[in-house]
Image (cartoon, coloured by chain):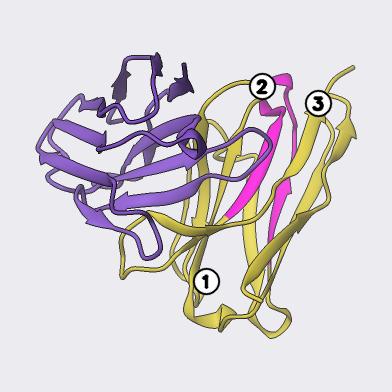
Chain colours: A yellow, B purple
């Protein structure tokens, strides 16, 4: 079954860290670029970060640059998002999203998301 | 950053109606635009990519058009299952989404 499953979310205090994971199955993980997209409660979608299959191309949204780090382990079919110096505005459901068609950043497969709540 | 603005923000229509949602970009994105459908508690689902290409498995009542800065998503005959929030997304420069259009069935 083609799917991606996020994990690692939770409730944390401002200034602390959290590491999210995205486990993929049912497709050749090493052939696909994966992104992180987040959605604050009751709000719209915000793109967060992307890493190419070989790990050489990495981009971040300005809102997370310098605080978040994306990585992947092709041998384990997983992608991770290390989130440091968390802020209340980082509270959101974090989705892993797959880019399928060439170099175009749109997403044909999404996970169900993992919820991150940053609160004191 | 390219800003995407959708209209209307909410929409109420009856089964069988033709429904149109508009998305405007703050600068030209050519045809580098996608549309998604999101139902409560679910992940977004890709409907349309490159402005007018229908994703595999998506009903043909959904269609997209436009280029440059103005785009539309049309549902030719609204069905009860189409109740959802719809988002446009540009991928011409990085990636940004519209604020969403909530579609309700009367």
- Asked whether, in this view, residue A7 is left or right of residue B40, the answer is right
Same subunit, labels 1 and 3: the answer reads yes
Q: Chain of mark 1?
A: A
Distance from the alpha carbon under mark 2 to that under mark 1: 27 Å
Q: Chain of mark 3?
A: A
Circle 1 residue: A55
- Asked whether, in this view, residue B61 is left or right of residue B52, the answer is right
Q: Please tell me which of labels 2 and 1 falls first in the chain.
A: 1
Q: Secondary structure at mark 1?
A: loop
Closest to the observer, B91 or B66: B66
Same subunit, labels 3 and 2: the answer reads yes
Distance from the alpha carbon under mark 3 to that under mark 2: 8 Å
Q: Please tell me which of labels 3 and 2 falls first in the chain.
A: 2
Crowd rating for badge 2 (residues with CA inside 10 Å; few <14, some 14–19, many 20+): few
Q: Residue at x 65, y 68 (%)?
A: A3
Q: Residue at x 39, y 21 (%)?
A: B14
Rendered location of residue B19, percent (x, y): 28, 27
Establish if A81 lies above or below B10.
Answer: below
Select label 1 or label 3 by which is in front: 3
Q: Residue at x 64, y 32 (%)?
A: B40
Q: Secondary structure at mark 3?
A: strand
Rendered location of residue A84, percent (x, y): 74, 40
Circle 2 residue: A89
Select label 2 or label 1 by which is in front: 2
**Is label 1 in contact with label 3 (beta carbons under 8 Å)?**
no
Closest to the observer, B71 or A95: B71
């Amino acid at each position: 079954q083609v799917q991606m499953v996020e994990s690692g979310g939770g409730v944390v205090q401002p200034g602390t860290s959290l590491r999210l994971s995205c486990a993929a199955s049912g497709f050749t993980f090493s052939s696909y670029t994966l992104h992180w997209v987040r959605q604050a409660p009751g709000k719209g979608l915000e793109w967060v970060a992307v890493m190419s299959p070989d790990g050489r191309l990495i981009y971040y949204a300005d809102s997370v640059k310098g605080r978040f780090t994306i990585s992947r382990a092709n041998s384990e079919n997983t992608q991770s998002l290390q989130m440091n110096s968390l802020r209340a505005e980082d509270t959101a459901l974090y989705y892993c999203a797959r880019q399928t068609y060439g170099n175009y950043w749109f997403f044909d497969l999404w996970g169900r998301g993992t919820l991150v709540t940053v609160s004191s | 950053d390219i800003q995407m603005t959708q209209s209307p923000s909410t929409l109420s229509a009856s089964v069988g109606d033709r429904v149109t949602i508009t998305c405007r970009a703050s600068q030209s994105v050519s045809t580098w635009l996608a549309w998604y459908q999101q139902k409560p508690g679910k992940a977004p689902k890709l409907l349309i990519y490159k402005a007018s290409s229908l994703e595999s498995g998506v009903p043909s009542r959904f269609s997209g058009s436009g280029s440059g800065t103005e785009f539309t998503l049309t549902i030719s005959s609204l069905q009860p299952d189409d109740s959802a929030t719809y988002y446009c997304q540009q991928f011409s420069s990085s990636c940004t989404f519209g604020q969403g259009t909530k579609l309700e069935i009367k």
